[in-house]
Image (cartoon, rainbow, N blue to C red):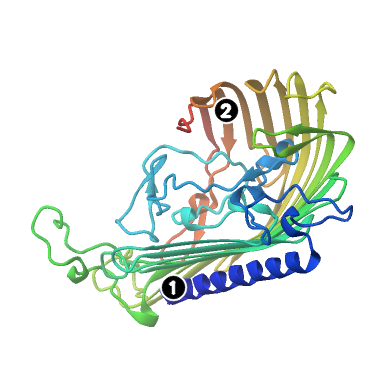
Amino acid sequence: MIKRLALVFFLIQFLDVSAVFAQRTIRAQGSGIGSSGRMGQTGERDTSLNKTSDADSIYYYARQIRYTNFKLLKEGTQTRGIDTTVKNFQNFSPLYQPENPTIGLGSAGIAYREMLFNPSRTIGFDAGFHSLDLYKLIQDSIKFYRAKSPYTELYYVNGRIHEQMFKVTHSQNVKPNLNVGAHYNRLTGDGFYVNQKADHLNAALFAWYESPKKRYNIMGDVIFNTLKAGENGATRNDTIFKANSLDKRAEPVFLKGTRADRPMQTWRQTQFLLKQLYYVGRIDSLQGPDSSERILPTQRVSHTLTYTRDQYKFFRNEEDIYGAFPTLPSQSFTLTNDSTKVSNLRNEFSYSFYLRGKALSFIKNELKLDLGIQNDLYHYEQLAYESNFSNTMLKAGLGYRFSDKVNIDGDLNQIVQGRNAGDFFYEANTSFLLSKSIGRIVLGAYIQNKSPEQMFERVDYQYHSWDRNFERSKNKQPILFIPKSKI
């Protein structure tokens, strides 16, 4: 199915490019522009287009497709060109990334564990489900584009055990300052053993509008995640790696239900986000290294509204012949349908102030102050248990940039009201850019005081039930980060 879908997309894009090329050729011939390109309202040539030897054609290049994300927008409005290289092209699986190794059962799509100690750096409420996190599409992965022509990116991988990965991203400017787009991702695989089949779907719709005077930005997206991962309870042969094994598909497992009774984890997430930025006072502009314009405000106010609904479900419908589940006195279950639902409504307001000189060839001696408040409303369900609660977090950040090569930053996050009041995360970093080829060295440290995940404190499932109260986990860690060279 995915192969056919990929072929259809390739054909559509080929026909679309041919049609656009023909329209541009006819328009140029009919207007009498000749080799001078597209005409503007003043009768002069649009210098954003590239000169070519073809007198009746206009060509668009990859460097005219640019994007931003929420990380880039923290310091102002800036964009980057798309990556047209094949760096890390072979590392297609989210499980096998050199900088974040994981351990699993060999196939993409099923549960995994990280091999390196990498504690969560968030605070507040956490439901505690993370065994499939790498397969989710998150806000940090969304790119908002500026495209002088419609842009489509296709990616397809076909591997062993019917493992397939298909991605498509399409974006286009419906107006010069309004871009819309969509992203679709599908990962499927049968796995090596029985009941390891995975079927993950990620989709997103996104849009970005910037006012003509570049003071106001609004961007929004809707993300859909549906993750389905098979569960077999492990192989019954506990010497599988010591002696000659049968074919992996023939190895007996603890849970062997098929078709509608196939045991699996099913995670569903729907997330809506709307972010607004407004620049107050003087606005500076800085020319980037790739000739892009960077908008630097002196004051900024922003508001972010996010609504997220998560559902985590485990299903099985077969007798527990081999003792995969705990033994319950005088009870025997054939059907298991455990589920957890979490709804979160988040409002965040922030104000940023920047103090810098007026003459700008590059940023130096800049003082930055960030202040913010974040409120979260939660609704939590787990079988017969329900709970409504909230958290209010205060945020502050202070930074000083000596130049483009040296800067110091500090961030403080503290939950002051609500269920997780007392959680905090404080961090301080300083970075030094040695050279563009070597990279930037980051030195710092952070301290964290975090409430335990809900899964550790309270569970109301068919085979597991407890209600406990643990102390907060405390984490103090130094930071030394040396990025890889670009060469």
Q: Residues within 10 Å of mark 1 (few under 14, many from 20)?
A: some
Amino acid type at mark 2:
Tyr
Kindly identify the residue that appears in the image at 78 percent across and 28 percent down. Answer: 369
Locate residue 66, reporting x and y percent.
65, 49
In which quadrant of the rendered image does the C terminus lie?
Answer: top left
At x 42%, y 46%, the residue is 88
Determine the secondary structure under disc 1.
helix
| Left or right of residue 33, residue 233 in this image | left
User: In this orientation, does residue 271 appear?
Assistant: no
Q: Is residue 396 above or below residue 316?
A: above
Of residues 375 and 292, which is closer to you in this image? Answer: 292
Q: Nearer the viewer, residue 10 or 450?
A: 10
Q: Quadrant of residue 427?
A: top right
Answer with mark 1 or mark 2, whichever residue precedes in sequence: 1
Q: Which mark is residue 2?
A: 1
Pointer 2: what residue? 446
Image-based side of 305 in relation to 213, left or right: left
The residue under label 1 is which amino acid type?
Answer: Ile
Residue in front for this viewpoint, 145 or 457: 145
Residue 74, x across and y down, in percent:
71, 38
Residue 172 point in image, percent of width and height: 69, 61
Asked if 368 appears above or below 9 in the picture, the reply is above
Q: Residue 140 in the image: x percent, y percent?
A: 60, 48
